[in-house]
Amino acid sequence: MTSEAAFPANFLWGAATSAYQIEGQPLADGAGPSIWHRFAHTPGRVANGDTGDLACDHYRRFEEDVALMADLGLGAYRFSVAWGRVLPEGRGSVNAKGLDFYRRLVDALLERGIAPMITLYHWDLPAALHDRGGWLNPDSPAWFADYAQVLFRALDDRVPLWVTINEPWVVTVPGYLDGELAPGHRDPFEAPRVAHHLLLAHAEAVAAYRSLGGRHRIGLAVNLEPQHPASPTPENQAAARRRDAFINRWFLDPLYLGRYPAELATIFGAAWPEFADADLARIRSTSDSVLGGSLGTGCATDFIGVNYYSRGLVRADPNTQPLGAIRISPENAPRTTMGWEVYPPGLTETLLWIKEHYGNPPTYITENGAAFDDPPPADGLVPDPERVDYLRAHLRAAHAALEQGADLRGYFVWSLFDNFEWAQGYSQRFGLIRVDPPNQARILKASARFYQNVIRANGV
Ligand code: PNW
């Protein structure tokens, strides 16, 4: 059967997860607690009092899970390393048992011909580092680079793709400005400093990778969403431009252009610090050789990872500070159970925007997917037609960007499993595979079969 949208021959098809969301046993084998372990065990922070204590029990069932990935035909698997399993105190001595878990996972993947993409930081900062100021501490970029080196030394011979930090914006804004995610701070004076340290942490890790002679590719994953005014009033148009600077350009402008968007100083006012020119040069230097077109050389960030879920439909709102803008959910549009509008053309727009603004760097869609209220399984399969439609439409949108010249190298579904959806606990199901934490049975959804066919046909 010929497919309507054929992807390039070497296109990478994957699925994604993160450590705290699926592993369970967060303190096993000498691991140190993370800020997410603490946050989830603080009453009132996570829906229904859910925690990652058991999650998908992947820490014990990883072999079975890798076999499922092989059945789906995945070419790649994106997962994150729990920093506190490897370094229980966040720095200092390595916990061999924790590191060994990731060694065995990588080996199991390679035995099945699945390429590992490792995310070094997916939000689970060791609590011991948080107690030293966490991402507010100017030493935090060095802590991160030291931790990253442990992983590079142990696994770079077998790991072709590295992501330093997942969604620095989500770490910064829900973590330190709105207080919805760990560590749950609400402080406009903290957020810009945290963001700056995350960018420096990325830069230091990339520099460490190069100086160790890293042989593969390393990038940063950002959450992006095109911002459209809810109506064409001047107020809403200005609000959409502010939100574009605030979400889409906060991290990519410094990385590729060497400066923060000017809007941020206006948005944060007195809370926006002066940042040293040397820091911005350091951050930018990590993208230089990408713009020169060569990969894996110099101090380059080799690729950008894009996590795409929806667009922002933006209305000016003076009561929402410091941004003065809110995202609204359009009444008549299809929405996921997260309340996010289903808006596939935004993925094409986002990929083309990266191409135009940042010199067409190599790009992976490191997350794309949707939460729906799946019905219970029927005849051994969960019927999830809404997720199938969501994935098909977004794959076509990605293909449209490829046709228009975007340098897209691969696509990862969020997520392989229903898992611990942060502050929403287990109430949101993003998986291709159904998991209910109490009984742990893995049950395929129709979307898993759909994706298996996409991979087989290399198209949709
Ligand atoms: C991503 N937003 O988070 C994360 O990388 C995943 O761990 C998470 O499970 C997934 O998306 C689904 O939520 C996001 O507000 C959180 O725009 C919030 C936003 C985007 C992504």
Image (tube, grey):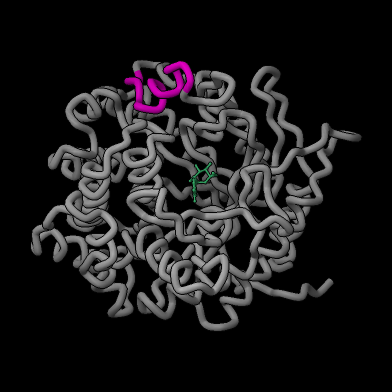
Q: Where is 394 relative to 152, above or below? A: below
- Image coordinates for residue 297, horizontal then vertical, percent: 26, 68
- At 62% across and 77% down in the image, what residue appears? 400
Say whether residue 229 is left or right of residue 287: right
Residue 271 appears anywhere in the view: yes
Q: Where is 57 relative to 401, above or below? A: above
Image quarter in which the C terminus is found = bottom right
Residue 366 or 43: which is nearer the viewer? Answer: 43
Say whether residue 392 is left or right of residue 179: right
Residue 214 or 345: which is nearer the viewer? Answer: 345
Say whether residue 450 is left or right of residue 149: right
- Image coordinates for residue 180, horizontal then vertical, percent: 43, 35
Q: So how many labels did they put on this image?
A: 0
Is 223 part of what is drawn in magenta?
no
- Image coordinates for residue 140, horizontal then vertical, percent: 19, 40
- Image coordinates for residue 148, horizontal then vertical, percent: 27, 43
Please tell me in which quadrant of the rendered image residue 278 appears. Answer: bottom left
Q: What stretch is highlighted in magenta?
A: 31-44
Residue 222 appears anywhere in the view: no
Residue 164 or 456: which is nearer the viewer? Answer: 164
| Residue occupying the far bottom of the picture | 404
Please tell me in which quadrant of the rendered image residue 388 appears. Answer: bottom right
- At 27% across and 64% down in the image, what residue appears? 255
- At 33% across and 51% down in the image, what residue appears? 322
Image quarter in which the N terminus is found = bottom right
Please tell me in which quadrant of the rendered image residue 293 appears. Answer: bottom left
